[in-house]
Amino acid sequence: MIVLMYGFTVLLLLYGMLLLKKEKKKQVSARLATVFNETAEETVPAGTPGEDIKKISFFSRIIKPLWKETRKSLQKNLTSEKREILEQKLLQAGSPFGMTPVEFRIVQIVMLVLLPLLAGGYALLTNAEPGRILMFTAGGFAAGKYLPSFYLKQKAKARNKEALKALPDFIDLLTVSMEAGLGFDSALSKVTAKKEGVLSSEFQRCLEEMRLGKTRKEALSGVRQRLELEDVNSLIGSIIQAEQLGIGMVQVLNVQANEIRGRRKQRAEETAMKAPIKMLFPLVLFIFPCIFIVILGPAIIQIVEVFE
């Protein structure tokens, strides 16, 4: 019964997070409707009568103002240096859930408070000893402190892996488009429109930044900052250098595609060479003992019976 109540509490927490995301989407829709002179749904006009105010959701009356005040206070206390670091990490992770640095900081604080309480409450409900309660609380505190950062690192790692996998084919399509007579920007726009994935979305953002006034060097450097990959750094560095020196872009892309495929082959060979060493530990710990039990077990039983 205690475990069921604990699970029900966690489910309620997850449901509340989903509702929060839904309300945020409604708020964005209302803002867009205001900009385009449209009538936004579920907006309350000024001077709403008392009966209509009662119909407003609990989220709009209590949670939303509290959320705004918390954001304002944290935004004042968060230094520009920390904000830039958090923003860079969020960009590398693909801006999960559209979070800003302030919102991510709020999530960190909430988890830092909530997880120790949940862990300690679970230990209390199971009538655990004081030492075990303290251990559960400390574990919840450690999880609340490191889980958000770990989540961002894993998201960034997954995005980098996906981008690295798609990079050679992306360069080939870009090269073919330029050989067909398109300029670099036009070819990049054509490839990003036809191809999906992390790499396409990053270069699409690069094109949008160039349309907004950034130079090609600045926009490409932004891609290099959001994708921490040696191959992407080499590609963008070569493109910037080719633009400055006036070298043919098709030649540069062909060379980069060959080099990236060569490095990918080397990484595959390195992974294959590491496989036997990685397989050694499960063999020694799990498979060999079972084989020894099957082979030597009957002999040991017979020896024991003889000496008895």
Image (tube, grey):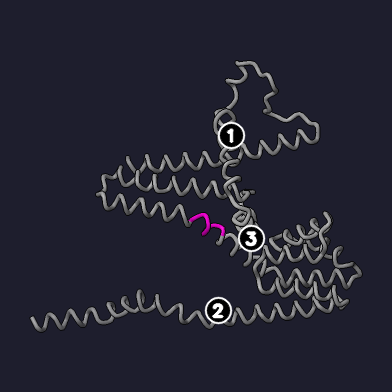
Q: Judge whether residue 197 is colored magenta.
A: no
Of marks 3 and 1, which one's residue comes earlier in the chain? 1
The amino acid pointed to by label 1 is Lys
Structural distance between the alpha carbons of marks 1 and 2: 50 Å
CA separation in Å, label 3 and label 2: 25 Å
232 relative position to 307: left or right: right
| 22 relative to 77, above or below | above
Question: Residue 101's x, y, as percent?
Answer: 61, 51
Identify the residue at horizontal 34%, vertical 52% (top origin).
136
Q: Quadrant of residue 143?
A: bottom left
**Displayed quadrant of residue 72:** top right
- Give the alpha-carbon distance from disc 3 to disc 1, as whole Å: 29 Å
- Give the percent coordinates (x, y) of residue 14: 50, 43
Looking at the rendered structure, the secondary structure element under dot 3 is helix
Label 2 Cα crowd, 10 Å radius (few <14 / some 14-19 / many 20+) = few
Residue that appears at 57% across and 28% down = 61
Badge 2 is on which residue?
271
Q: Of helix, strand and loop, which one carries label 1?
A: helix
- Residue numbers of the magenta segment: 147-152
Q: Which quadrant of the view contains residue 286?
A: bottom left
* Camera-side mark, 3 or 2: 3
Residue that numbered label 3 is attached to = 92
Q: What percent of the width, then of the height, locates residue 155?
A: 58, 59
Residue 16 image position (x, y, % from top left): 52, 38
Q: Which residue is identified by label 1?
A: 64
Q: Nearer the viewer, residue 280 or 158?
A: 158
